[in-house]
Image (tube, helix red, strand yellow):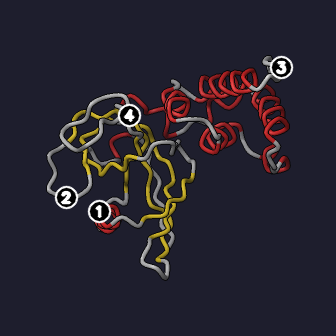
Amino acid sequence: MSINKPYRGPDDLPQVIPVFPLSGALLLPLGQLPLNIFEPRYMQMIDDALKGDRVIGMVQLLSDAPGQGSRPALYGMGCAGRITSLEESGDGRYVITLTGVARYRIVEELSAVTPYRQARVDFAPFAGDFDESGERDAVNRDGVIRALRRFAEVHRLSVDWEGIDAAPSDLLVNALSMMSPFGAKEKQALLEAPGLKARADVLIAIAEMDLGRDGAPATLQ
């Protein structure tokens, strides 16, 4: 099944969404995040989402903060995506793809009767997420690609360079941020960058720090 729907601004999205806490998983606007869903509570979340807007909010666990009861605390910002593909596996799992729409701030977590968590969210501060193409020219694209080349060389990663060269800067920066092997705090920093240009700069800085720890030359810009 493949379903897509354009969103033009914050008002097109629901104010209450199911949230899927998953440390290390980063979703950004227009990015595609594949997920294997096997826990019953999250399979119900998918079933319920398919009956409505098909919107799910990805968010990371804030591991160093106390939670409410048995629920671990969450970061205050995540990114909502729409289920754009779903397949049922032969062993009872859902294999879905979330396509990123826009980031959100959690206003409050609701006392939901569902087994999965729900929150009232605010998309208004991130109106720019609905079209980041205007920042393409401001991105330090050469710096991002140099950082990626050095990072791939040091870590012996295979990279589709033809695809990298052909990708527009907004898709390039967001896809690389999502695929990066960095930790939860670094990925949250990429999520919280104010815009596309800032996210590219954060991506370069994180790669520099990683290479510096590995003893590689740190300056990539």
Q: Circle 1 sits in a helix, a strand or a loop, which is it?
A: helix
Label 2 packing within 10 angstroms: few (<14), some (14-19), many (20+): few
Which amino acid lies under the numbered mark 2 shown in the image of this protein?
Thr
Q: Earlier in the sequence, mark 1 or mark 4?
A: 1
Q: Which residue is mark 3?
A: 217
> Residue 50's spot in the image, x, y percent?
34, 67
Q: Earlier in the sequence, mark 2 or mark 1?
A: 1
Q: Residue at x 46, y 77 (%)?
A: 88
Q: Which residue is mark 2?
A: 114
> The C terminus appears in which quarter of the rendering?
top right
Q: Which residue is mark 4?
A: 63
For marks 2 and 4, give the CA distance: 23 Å
Q: Circle 3 sits in a helix, a strand or a loop, which is it?
A: loop
For marks 1 and 4, give the CA distance: 21 Å
Disc assigned to residue 50:
none
Which amino acid lies under the numbered mark 3 shown in the image of this protein?
Pro
For marks 3 and 4, give the CA distance: 32 Å
Mark whose residue sits in front, 2 or 3 = 3
Disc assigned to residue 41:
1
> Residue 183's spot in the image, x, y percent?
56, 35
